[in-house]
Image (spheres, rainbow, N blue to C red):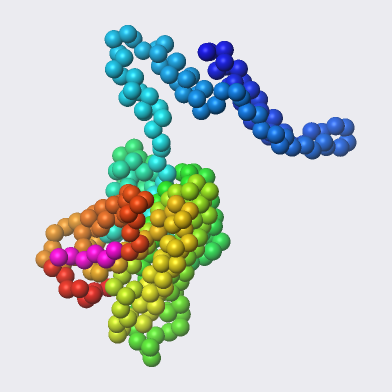
Amino acid sequence: MHILVDRVTWWERFWRDAKRWRHVPVGPVNITFKLTKRWRPRTPLLLIRQIKIQSQAMESRPAHARGEDTAAHTAITAPTKGPAVIVGVGPGFGEAAAALFAQRGFPVALVSRSSNALSAFAEDLQSSNRKVRAYPCDVTDERLVIALMRHIEAELGCPELVIYAVQASTPGSLLSSEAAAFEECWRANCFGAFLVAREAARSMKPHGKGTILFAGATSGTIGRQGYINFAPGKFGLRALAQVIARELWPDGIHVAHVVIDGDIAESEEPDNEPHIKPNELAEIFLSLHLQPKSCWASEIDVRPADERFWEHC
């Protein structure tokens, strides 16, 4: 059995290396070639690798430790988690979500415009031996978002989960608001979500899995007076989520929109206001990510028990 394993491993390694040879210099010219026929051993490689692992475990274990084999084999073959990308990390929900997913064993990519605060928060999470990286980025810039997702994938792997939690709001009315303020809020609340979701989907689709979650607001369902700059972007975010859910669900990518109908506390300190606790809201997003494929939700709304419906945000 060892001879078979070693022979196949050698051939597998040789074939992989041979396929990398593309240009062979011969004097003043280069010969270019490509190997197209795939070598297939008589024994499936997956089975051979499994046999090799089992064989090594059998040889190394003491006779009295046979009960430990199953746990050891499970540890070897357990799938690793892809990174959770939190876009819009700041005091409150963003930081709570990042901390929760780091605690649950996800590599975490922290994305925000504020580089100094982001780096300090990443260091705090890394102090607990967790893989956390800070990625300062203006997610309303297409070129920066493309580079961001490539950077994350190169360092942490294909994203398993992306949460878009950016929120930009400038109070105003139709007659008093400047065009620049309106455009800035729309770009942060909607356009950035489109860019991030598109690049995330491009990474996830070849793997046939992934989750993209959007943090919405009451203003995504009701256009109230004084929210001329905020509501259109949040309405657009909700529409974006509905459109891409229909597009990406068949590819195994879960897309959902969370209407956050309430004010989110910026810390876990108790107060007498009907605030949403950020750590508990983060648990809601985690539960969406963990939903079984036969029962995916496309939208949920959350609010404190002592909050009136559709009153805030």
For this view, does 121 lie left or right of residue 52?
left
Q: Give above or below for 178 relative to 190.
A: below
Q: In the image, residue 261 lies at what x, y percent?
A: 25, 69
Q: In the image, residue 222 lies at what x, y percent?
A: 30, 78
Is residue 117 something one can see in this rendering?
no
Q: Range of the magenta residues?
A: 300-305
> Residue drawn 34% across and 84% down?
172
> Residue drawn 71% across and 37% down?
36
> Residue drawn 70% across and 34% down?
37
Q: Give above or below for 298 relative to 45.
A: below
Q: Give above or below for 59 relative to 209.
A: above
Q: In the image, residue 74 lies at what x, y percent?
A: 36, 28
> Residue drawn 33% across and 59% down?
297
For this view, does 297 lie left or right of residue 147?
left
Q: Is residue 51 magenta?
A: no
Q: In the image, residue 192 lies at what x, y percent?
A: 46, 66
Q: Is residue 302 magenta?
A: yes
